[in-house]
Amino acid sequence: MPDVLSAPLVVEFPFTRSLGPVQSAFLTGLRERTVLGVRADDGTVLVPPVEYDPVTANELGDLVEVAPTGTVTTWAWNPSPRRDQPLDTPFAWVLVRLDGAGTALLHVLDAPGPDAVRTGMRVRIRWAANRTGAITDIACFEPYESEPGPAEPAPHTGEFADPVTGITAPARLDYVHTPGRAQSAYIKALEERRTVGERCPSCRKVYVPPRGACPTCGVATAEQVEVGPRGTVTTFCIVNIKAKNLDIEVPYVYAHIALDGADLALHGRIAGIPYDQVRMGLRVEPVWSEGARHVDHYRPTGEPDADYDTYKELV
């Protein structure tokens, strides 16, 4: 049995969204060291504010200003902060009900250790030195001995100069990917410039890349079958937006390619032909970059196009 491979994998992208009037006022307020909530239909002040009542689904817009002090309602200690977390030293995750609010805000508490944290303790906001209109304008909470503030918050128009209208939040997932026995064999075959799949012992279909089990019959697969290297374009799309960190000029074509002998189409880029001449049925072959462990792209073979009936089940 071949060794099972594993490797670190990072999925990262920026998530950009526009803001409605309530969220815009909340984030702009943080930039101005002001915490806003919104009053729900039952009178509860929601912090952070939402645009629609969680019970009635009615649109909300009655903004109020709450205090920068509050009470910890529950907490959990984090002894090992991760990259890009609010603090780089051990801290507590806390739910804080700010004075005047009826709900709790999730953030972090800067404390010397878990013995210094308790439910019911009083805290206040420590504002970031540089504020841009984001939840990170609250750098953290810190212990603060005080009596609870007034329960009734002050009304607020939500109007600020130069309001924040959109945010870009980075999304990132770091993990170790283990492809398993079947895909490890597939990847190792690619190092030898071969493409292998596995045949289902029941329906006899060959799946590429192999999954270790037949997705139709649900039985384990073990018989390796070499397929290709040539194949047929079953369907495709033209990419017009350049991806970050991808050194490929747009427009280019990304296609589903049914390799000869395979019963499942795989993904691949088509090159060596003008993008507007790529078509269903086009016969293609792989092109390997020097020293690469995978196919760089597929190019036309010059053969006549495949008849639709030969690949229609794989579209």
Image (tube, rainbow, N blue to C red):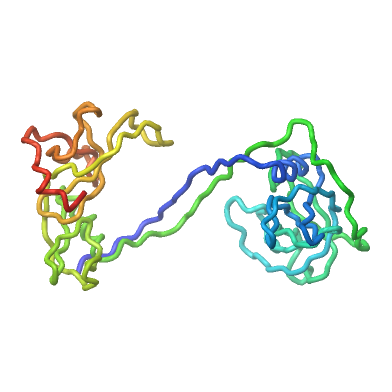
Q: Considering depth in this image, is 37 or 179 the residue closer to the camera?
A: 37
Q: Position of residue 139 (x, y in %)?
A: 73, 49
Q: Quadrant of residue 231?
A: top left
Q: Residue furthest left?
A: 303
In the displayed structure, would residue 30 be above or below residue 7?
above
Q: Position of residue 175 (x, y in %)?
A: 44, 58
Residue at 61 percent of width and 62 percent of height: 80
Q: Is residue 40 visible?
A: yes
Residue at 67 percent of width and 57 percent of height: 57
Query: In the picture, which quadrant includes the N terminus?
Result: bottom left
Q: Considering depth in this image, is 224 or 289 the residue closer to the camera?
A: 224
Residue at 14 percent of width and 48 percent of height: 311
In the displayed structure, would residue 177 be above or below residue 27?
below
| 18 lies left or right of 188 | right
Q: How many marks?
A: 0
| 146 lies left or right of 180 | right
In the displayed structure, would residue 302 be above or below residue 100?
above
Q: Is residue 97 visible?
A: no
Q: Considering depth in this image, is 153 or 294 the residue closer to the camera?
A: 153
| 197 lies left or right of 26 | left
Q: Position of residue 286 (x, y in %)?
A: 16, 41
In the displayed structure, would residue 162 be above or below residue 280?
above
Residue at 14 percent of width and 40 percent of height: 281
